[in-house]
Image (tube, rainbow, N blue to C red):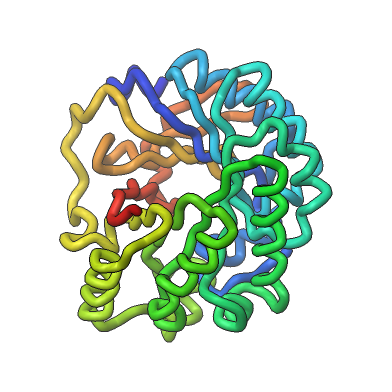
Amino acid sequence: MIGEVTGIKKIRMLYLQLLYRCNFTCLHCFHGKRLQYADAFTAEEAASLLTLMRDEYGTEAVTLLGGEPFLHRDLAQVVRHAKEELGQRVEICTNGYRIERRLTEVSPYLDLLRVSLEGVGSTNDGIRRQGSYHSALNSLSLARDLGVPTGATMTVTSRNIGEVLPLAGVLAQLGVRQLKLHHLRPVGNAADHPELLVTEPSAYVRLREELASADLPLEVIVDEDLSEHGAPQVCAPSGGPREIDRIEADPRGALTMSCKAVGKDSHAFWYEKAAGRIVHKPSSADELTLAVPDVVYARA
């Protein structure tokens, strides 16, 4: 269905939000009230979508997210299906809070564990949850000991913009390979915390200069809104590319692609779980989150 409408023949990666439920209520979380929703993929529904994407669009990698994916009771089943049955590259994005037992269970099938952190020590805990900083570091250490490659993400806010380089140093000591920096968007919980927004453009300029001059021991990637020229203000016209980097599925089955690739159809597709098929619903643009591509800014 996606190919018929957009002409896209290949989608390299699926970002699969397994559930909304989370054990954190981070100040900046874009899900907001959706964290209270019960929507979730069953293991069978997730496996069906993964198989469909592999068979129809050559999808070769999956990133499992939430909410908090380690709260999904059948996470190991989904991970094993993606790795053993489909041969896909598997990444999990997590808050890293008390996941040791389940991480050990899924580690043989995992290509990357990515943990979210918002700064060093109390800066992180003030945004995410008390005790979450040390728990996240413990999870990264365990992943390293289990032989699982690791990465981290950080949403840049007014509270932590000065801690990007210090956090990168801590992560490097744990063998973390990559840090992704994301721009804070005033949606979800962040809409209730405007004080977190970085309102001075020169602060981003200074951050880019610091990254460019630092002798970084790990790769740093920023999303387009933090890049020098910012994200594009308009979507691409119809007749976009035949191959795109990713598509995102939320726990309801709503699918999102970058509007730069498919224009007005960026939010127009849904995965009908019961039927196991993708359908086109052009009227469903609403408030779904736009998938913004990442760009490499600095690396060792």
Name which residue lies at 37% across and 39% down: 257
**Residue ranking furthest to the top:** 55
**Residue ranking furthest to the bottom:** 195
**Res 110 quadrant in image:** top right
Relative depth, front residue between 226 and 262 = 226
Q: As displayed, is residue 228 above or below residue 128?
A: above
Q: As displayed, is residue 225 above or below residue 203?
A: above
Name which residue lies at 50% across and 63% down: 30
Q: As displayed, is residue 84 above or below residue 74?
A: above
Relative depth, front residue between 182 and 231 = 182
Asked whether residue 251 appears in the rendered view, the answer is no
Q: Is residue 124 left or right of residue 24?
A: left
Q: As displayed, is residue 82 above or below residue 205?
A: above
Q: How many marks?
A: 0
Q: Is residue 138 left or right of residue 172?
A: right
Residue 10's spot in the image, x, y percent?
Answer: 37, 21
Q: Is residue 102 left or right of residue 119?
A: right
Of the 4 image quadrants, the one containing the N terminus is: top left
Name which residue lies at 72% across and 52% down: 142
Asked whether residue 3 appears in the rendered view, the answer is yes
Name which residue lies at 39% across and 37% down: 268
Residue 196's spot in the image, x, y percent?
Answer: 43, 81
Residue 152's spot in the image, x, y percent?
Answer: 52, 56
Relative depth, front residue between 188 and 70 = 70
Q: Is residue 167 left or right of residue 203?
A: right
Relative depth, front residue between 68 and 222 = 222
Residue 232's spot in the image, x, y percent?
Answer: 19, 53
